[in-house]
Each structure stands twice: as C-alpha cells, then as structure tokens.
Amino acid sequence: MNVICFDLEGPLSPQDNAYEVASLVPNGDAIFETLSRYDDLLALAGRHNYEPGDTLALIVPFLLAHGISEDDITRVTSHARIVGGAKDLIARLLSHDWDVHIISTSYEQHAHRIGAALGVKRDHIACTKFEIEKLREKLTEDDITRIRSLEEAVLSTDDEDVMFQKLDDFYFDELKNTALGDVFSQVRVVGGARKVAALEAIAAASGKTPRELIAIGDSITDSAMLGCVRDAGGTAIAFNGNEYAVPYANIGLAGTDIGLVWEFAEAHARGDPIELARTFEHEYRDDPRVDCLVGADADKIEAVIDAHKRFRKIVRGDAAKLG
C-alpha cells in the first residue's frame, strides 16, 4: 500500500486555526502575529527543545487568561473551508488503496474536524493535543495578572528586540513559576522534528522508509518533514509553499486547486515523480504551476517562492503572511 502524508493548514484547509482562535481575544491578531515572528526566530536560532509551530503553545496563556473555551475553538473550526480539489483528491486516493495520513501542528479540535470532512480516520491524524479546560483550572488570579501585563507589553512595545527579550523572560523563566508551569511540556505541538518523528512512525508501521512516502507541506513547520523525505529519495511536494518550505522540496506545486497531486501520486507509484515534474514544468506555468526543484539554484528557488507567494495569498488570505 502506498503512503501519503499531508500537512493540514495550507494544503487541505486555508484557515490558520490558531490565528483565528487567538483573534477571539481583544487585539489577538496583533498578539499572534508578534508571537509568530518570535516563533520563527526561536526555530531558526535552534533554541533547545523548541520546534517550528510552537506558536500554538505560546498563545495558550493568552487564551486561558481571556476565558477562551473548548466551545469557542469548535465554533471557529466549524467555519473552516477546504482547499479546492482536496476532498476529491483524498477520496480518489482512498478509493485506490492509498494510506492517507495528516500530520498537523493544528489543535486536535481542528485537525479532527477537517479530517472527518475529508474522510481521513482519526487514528491517521497526528496533531496537537490541547486540553484547554484542564489547563485553565491551574491558573490563579496572580497568574492571569502576570499574563495580562505581558499582553500590554506586546501591544505597546515598538522595539522588536526589546519585545523578544520580554517574551524570552516570560516563557523561559517567569511562566515556569506560575501554576501553569512549562507551557511547552503542557502543550506538545506537532511541528518541526516532531512532524518528522510522526512521519517516521507512520513509515515504520507501514513497513516502509521515508524514501517510499509522499509528503506535502507549505511552511516552516513542514521544512524538516519535507527535507527528510526529499533527502531519502522520496517525493516532497511544496504546495503554495513559503520561503521556509520550498527549499526543502523536490517538487513545487502552486495553484488554487490541489487536485494535480493525484498525477504525482500515480507517478510516485510508478517510480518517476521527478520526471513527471520536469514534464509538467513546461506544461503548467500558471494555475496550476509546477516546478521541478531537483538541482534548482538560488535564482530558481527565489522565482518559485515568488510564484507560490501569489497563490498562497489567494488561497490562504491573511494566514499567508504567517511563517
């Protein structure tokens, strides 16, 4: 049985669920965007035990302090759309005995809902467990006051270096002294190396190696997963990828519909997805656009990122600006 692993937010659903949930908080969009840039900085700096996508842990204190509930998260995810062609693609893969998995940073409330809409079984979804009501019970009034003080600083500090130092002090020192404790151990986000671990576990359970898999992603949380599959000789597809994802893929696919992945799935099963990408590179130059990234130089990578950026904005809207 062939195995394919999708990131969720981007390739399958355009919504950045955590961003939408954070936006329920007053000025939550501005807070989330600051934390997203901070997340990129920590990930790129290689901070110990920190993974791309841990923004979903960073925002937890603010969600708790403002009383965001399980019902709120469910309500937000109920409005999420599906990317064009995704439902038909998944149905076609399943009908041809593909083993379809989702590996997502998303909170479980969102990932399971989108997975169900697409027909992907819950036990085929690796995502971030988030027991928000249990976490809220741990907070004291003093903890909430401390979180609100950081919130005011986030919204009022213009110097990003100063802000990032305040965030460092809060998350890696002050927060550990609250009843919540180490938020990164409380909310283990499935991003970066944890996505690779999930992918390798899926491969092992199927009796396969990453070389035999297809992985599809679009952002910094997917770069390690894409790189793992690409370097092993598998099929790594960046769909409307950003500057963090495209350099780690061997195939670039940009457009408003993800349905063309089916052609690459068939080619993967035959053993010639890269050859197909080279052929499609000349055939599909608009919507969809295909690029073979094997051996691509810096100029080509930059051109592909620019092309993907246009479609990323069309498909994902405001979420396109997040890492």
Image (spheres, rainbow, N blue to C red):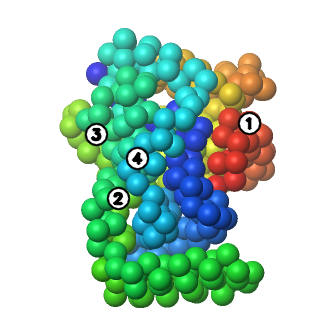
**Callout 2, which amino acid?**
Ile
Name the residue tied to disc 4: 71
- Vertical side of 50 occupied by 278: above or below: above
Q: Which mark is residue 314?
A: 1
Residue 70 visible, this angle: yes
Are the residues at dot 2 and dot 1 in contact (C-beta closer than 8 Å)?
Answer: no
Name the residue tied to disc 3: 202
Q: Quadrant of residue 180?
A: bottom left
Point out the tag, 2 or 4, that comes first from the N-terminus. 4
Question: Left or right: where does residue 288 sit relative to residue 92?
Answer: right
Point out the tag, 4 or 3, that comes first from the N-terminus. 4
Question: Relative to the observer, which residue lies in front, 33 or 161?
Answer: 33
- Residue drawn 68% across the image and 28% down it: 256
Are the residues at dot 1 and dot 3 in contact (C-beta closer than 8 Å)?
Answer: no
**Callout 3, which amino acid?**
Ile
Q: Quadrant of residue 241?
A: top right
Residue 229 visible, this angle: no
Quarter of the rendering occupied by the N terminus: top left
Point out the tag, 1 or 4, that comes first from the N-terminus. 4
Name the mark nearer the viewer: 3 or 2. Answer: 2
Cα separation between marks 3 and 2 = 27 Å
Name the mark nearer the viewer: 4 or 3. Answer: 4
- Vertical side of 293 occupied by 268: above or below: above
Q: Which mark is residue 132?
A: 2
- Residue drawn 22% across the image and 34% down it: 207
* Image x and y of residue 158, in percent: 75, 81
Are the residues at dot 4 and dot 3 in contact (C-beta closer than 8 Å)?
Answer: no
Cα separation between marks 2 and 1 = 32 Å
